[in-house]
Image (spheres, helix red, strand yellow):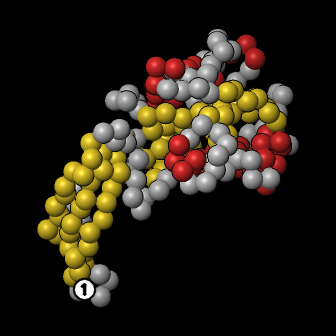
Amino acid sequence: MNNTRIRNHTSEVLSDDWAILKKHRFDYQRKDGTWESQVRQTYDRGNGAVILPYDPARGTVLLTRQFRLPAYVNGHAEPLIEACAGLLDKDDPETCIAREAEEELGYRLREPQRVFDVFMSPGSVTERLVFFVACYAPGDKIGHGGGNSEEGEDIDVIETSLDNALSMISRGEIIDGKTIMLLQHIKLAGLMGA
């Protein structure tokens, strides 16, 4: 990494438990040419991938519902409804999302299409997510899904119409950013047809 507007960058590990929390000190050159010292923290849990399977023949999508501690401690007691996602764990995004779809949804998805590669919370989280969509059909089901219990996952699989999922956003039932982005992408891109 090389950015001429950053100098004297040092970092200190504050925690290395479930993920890595670092404190960074650096000098940043402002647009007017002056330099200012800044201190920031970053949270690094690795990069990930997310997928939203859709069935254009039936107008449905596959979602998950699971408890999320960060949402809970921020006042949201209910499990979140989300698109299937997971950490890369040293795999490429395509391998990761195929594994996660089988573990969480119980479906073997063919030909996932990469649609975005984004930072979700760049103010403090280093994670970059690769977004996918993929067609699915009932015949692609290979198991019950539910996640990997050894990783503490306890996931419900939800199959619903795209229209209902979009209405769930309006009703405040789907409040996860990555899921909203993928549902809107499927709608805006016309992937379900007319």
Q: Residue at x 61, y 54 (%)?
A: 75
The residue at 27%/47% (across/down) is 15
Pick the residue in front: 116 or 63: 63
Q: Nearer the viewer, residue 143 or 20?
A: 20
Residue positioned most to the left: 8
Q: Secondary structure at mark 1?
A: loop
Q: Position of residue 56 (x, y in %)?
A: 78, 31
For the N terminus, which image quadrant?
bottom left
In the figure, 130 relative to 110: above or below? below
> Residue 145 appears in which quarter of the rendering?
top right
Is any part of residue 127 visible from this angle?
yes
- Name the residue carrying label 1: 33
Residue 90: x, y in percent?
A: 34, 29
The reply, left or right, for residue 109 in relation to residue 130 is right
Q: Which amino acid lies under the numbered mark 1 shown in the image of this protein?
A: Gly
Residue 67 drawn at (x, y percent): 60, 37
Left of 91 or right of it: where is 37?
Answer: left
**At 64% across and 46% down in the image, what residue appears?**
77
Q: Residues within 10 Å of mark 1 (few under 14, many from 20)?
A: few
